[in-house]
Image (cartoon, helix red, strand yellow):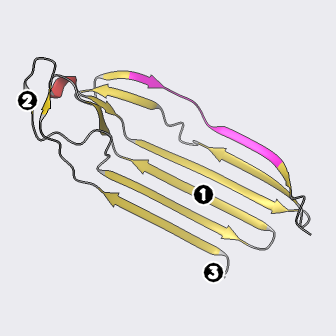
Amino acid sequence: IWKGLGVYLNYTYLSSSADGIRNEDGDLREDLDLPGAAPHMLNASLSFETKRLVLRASLNYSDAYIDEVGDSDFADRYYDQQLFLDVNGSFAITEQLRVFAEANNLTNQPLRYYQGVSERTMQMEYYNARFNLGLKYDLFKK
């Protein structure tokens, strides 16, 4: 019953700090989170594979992180947390021909920046879920 089942799980915790950053007025900012470094990240995937069928669901999470250092804590720009859910699958019609389907961003995760505190949205963009359906043909497989 477990044959063909796959599980992938990866969690990363990152603690960082940056010192010696000066704002436009020359004031020193200390003990800032390192820009671009998310403290918590999680990737998980569940898959099922047979000779002809491949099914996969993937979840990706990234915590909010400082994107741009401002003059003060209040002016720092953050890239908000994100949670993506993607699923895909394929079925081999022949050894050379497969039909595939993909569904990405099923959570409709927005791209969002905020300033200082999460309630102060600076920018928010939605891109909706994306779906693909198609055929793959391998010219060199026999």
The majority secondary structure of the magenta stretch comes to strand
Decide which of tag 2 and tag 3 comes sooner along the chain.
Answer: 3
Left/right placement of residue 41 relative to residue 16 reads right
Q: Which residue is mark 2?
A: 28
Q: CA distance from mark 1 to mark 3?
A: 17 Å
Q: Which residue appears at 34% of the width and 45% of the height?
A: 63
Q: Residue at horizontal 12%, vertical 41%?
A: 31
Q: Give the distance between the C-alpha atoms of the residues marked 1 and 2, in whole angstroms.
A: 46 Å
Q: Residue at x 68, y 54 (%)?
A: 88
* Circles 2, 3 touching at the beta carbon (< 8 Å): no
Q: Which residue is mark 3?
A: 2
**Residue 55 screen position, x and y as percent:** 69, 62
**Residue 83, placed above or below residue 23:** below
Label 2 neighbourhood size at 10 Å, few (<14), some (14-19), many (20+)? few
Of the numbered discs 1 and 2, the one sitting upstream in the chain is 2
Instruction: Name the one closer to the observer, 78 or 127.
Output: 78
In terms of depth relative to the viewer, which is nearer, 84 or 137? 137
In this picture, residue 83 sits left or right of residue 39: right
> Which mark, by number, is residue 57?
1
Residue 45: name its quadrant: bottom right
CA gap between label 2 and label 3 equals 57 Å
Where disc 3 sits, the SS reads loop
Looking at the picture, how far across and down is residue 116, in whole percent? 22, 27
Give the answer, above or below, for where 40 lies relative to 3: above
Q: Is residue 130 magenta?
A: yes
